[in-house]
Image (cartoon, rainbow, N blue to C red):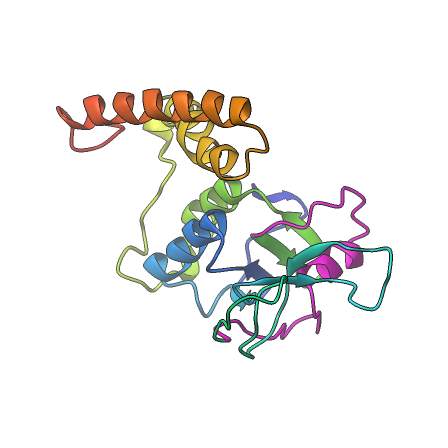
Amino acid sequence: PTGRDGFRAMAGRYHLYVSSACPWANRVIAVVFLKGLQDCVTLSAAHPTWQRTRPYSKHDLHCGWLFSTEAMPNVIGKGMFRGNGTTDSVNGAIFLRDIYEFAHDETGKYSTPVLWDKYTNTIVNNESSEIVRMLSSEFNEWATGPLALLSLYPLSYRTEIDLANEWIYKGINDCVYKCGFAKTQAAYDESIKLLELSLNRLEELLSTNRYVIG
């Protein structure tokens, strides 16, 4: 969490790179606004469509998030999507890929959200659940929103939360992606089966409880 390894929670130190088209980034965005951290943690939002991140290269065909306010078609030239993104006010990056390369990342998986440290010019974290926990517990001093003191990872429920997150992530969150991006019928069938089982488990749980935990 923020505070370890020198990444101390501070107002104005951190910047978020997100996309409203990314479900993982959306839960981070929600926490920022629910807790009222807009003046503490700045934010750049990518355009909702993917674009070629090295458009002048014949060999680099990677497509990813672009920072732009203009309306444009998607990467295959279909449609026209309004420019509800922003520019990058911190690093002046055009693509999210640039942010990873600024931080000397070698994985090649340029995903959102990204929590960026302006002081050391590096990526602190790019796992949405961990960023949510940081924002919901480490930044209360600067929170001004309707749920300023909300903790999404209270100590008394952490074991239950971890257990629930494990099966919800594998069986619902990740399964939706696997269904959508399945390249074979067998892969789709395997994922949709687990997704159905997990949704049934969740429905049964919520039929007798208002919340998943507690």
Q: Residue at x 41, y 21 (%)?
A: 194
Q: Kindly give the residue lying farthest to the bottom in the view shown.
A: 70
Q: Quadrant of the C terminus?
A: top left
Q: Residue at x 70, y 45 (%)?
A: 109
Q: Is residue 71 left or right of residue 171?
A: right
164 in magenta: no
Q: Quadrant of the N terminus?
A: top right
111 in magenta: yes
Q: Is residue 177 visible?
A: yes
Whole-percent x and y of residue 172? 40, 31
Q: Is residue 33 left or right of residue 147?
A: right
Quadrant of the rendered structure where residue 143 is?
Answer: bottom left
Q: Is residue 186 above or below residue 39?
A: above
Q: Is residue 8 above or below residue 71?
A: above
Quadrant of the rendered structure where residue 139 is?
Answer: bottom left
Whole-percent x and y of residue 138? 47, 48
Query: 58 and 139: which one is in front?
Result: 58
Q: Residue at x 58, y 52 (%)?
A: 112
| Bounds of the magenta segment | 83-112
Q: How many marks?
A: 0
Q: Main secondary structure of the magenta part?
A: loop
Query: 108 and 90: which one is in front?
Result: 108
Q: Residue at x 26, y 29 (%)?
A: 212
Q: Is residue 120 visible?
A: no
Query: 99 and 186: which one is in front?
Result: 186
Whole-percent x and y of residue 40? 49, 65
